[in-house]
Image (cartoon, rainbow, N blue to C red):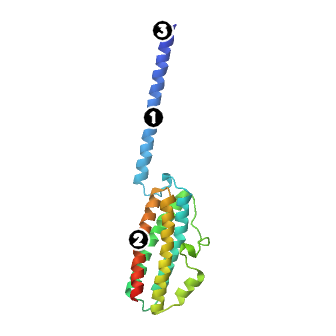
Amino acid sequence: MDNRTAATAAITLTALLLLAGCTGGTTSHEGMSGMDHGSESSAPPAASGATDADVMFASMMIPHHAQAIEMSDTLLAKDGIDERVAALAQEIKAAQQPEIDKMQGWLDAWGAEASDGHAMHHGDGMMSADDMAMLENATGSEAEKLFLSQMITHHRGAVDMAQAEIEDGSDTAAVSLARSIVEAQMAEIAEMEQLRGKL
């Protein structure tokens, strides 16, 4: 009986070990496949564990970027604008529209929506309706200086929002974009401040 019991126990243990090894191997393989798929895919990074901070960053930055593009379009529609200021406005448009598209893709994957901008305020660097009207009505040198002053404020708000994502966000792609925004917009702030002093 002792020998039979020992043999049964040994067989059972062997079977369990084989099963555990098989299961472990399968899990590991599936995990690696998932990682490979994520790294090769151009899909938004939902699988990387987006948090409320990540969603907030993307949903608020989209209307923020959209207003910067609107401000740039308003300036570019005017006659007699200094070519350096016009070039900067074009650069802002060229940089921010692709970022809007990228963040919108993330929100779609996360099942979230972009803010309509109403929850934002001047503390976020957003221009009010009156601010936008002032830019619309300004001409010549006045328009150039107003655009630069408004965009400096606007960019500082974006930098603050991006810094919050860097500190609180979890999604690696979103945090990476936030770092890029801080770097690019800080450089543009310096450029605009210098340019404003020359007009």
Residue 77 seen in the figure: no
Query: What is the distance, in whole Å, between disc 3 and disc 1 at their CAs?
Result: 31 Å
- Please state, as top left, top right, bottom left or bottom right, where the C terminus lies in the image: bottom left
Amino acid at circle 2: Ala
**Residue at which label 3 appears:** 3
* Left or right of residue 82: residue 142: right
Q: Is residue 67 above or below residue 3?
A: below
Counting residues from the start of the chain, the first of labels 1 and 2 encountered is 1
Q: Does dot 3 land on a helix, a strand or a loop? A: helix
Q: How many marks?
A: 3
Q: Residue at x 46, y 87 (%)?
A: 145
The disc at residue 59 is none
* Proximity of marks 1 and 2: CB atoms separated by less than 8 Å: no
Amino acid at circle 3: Asn
Counting residues from the start of the chain, the first of labels 3 and 1 encountered is 3
Q: Residue at x 47, y 28 (%)?
A: 19
**Residue at which label 2 appears:** 184
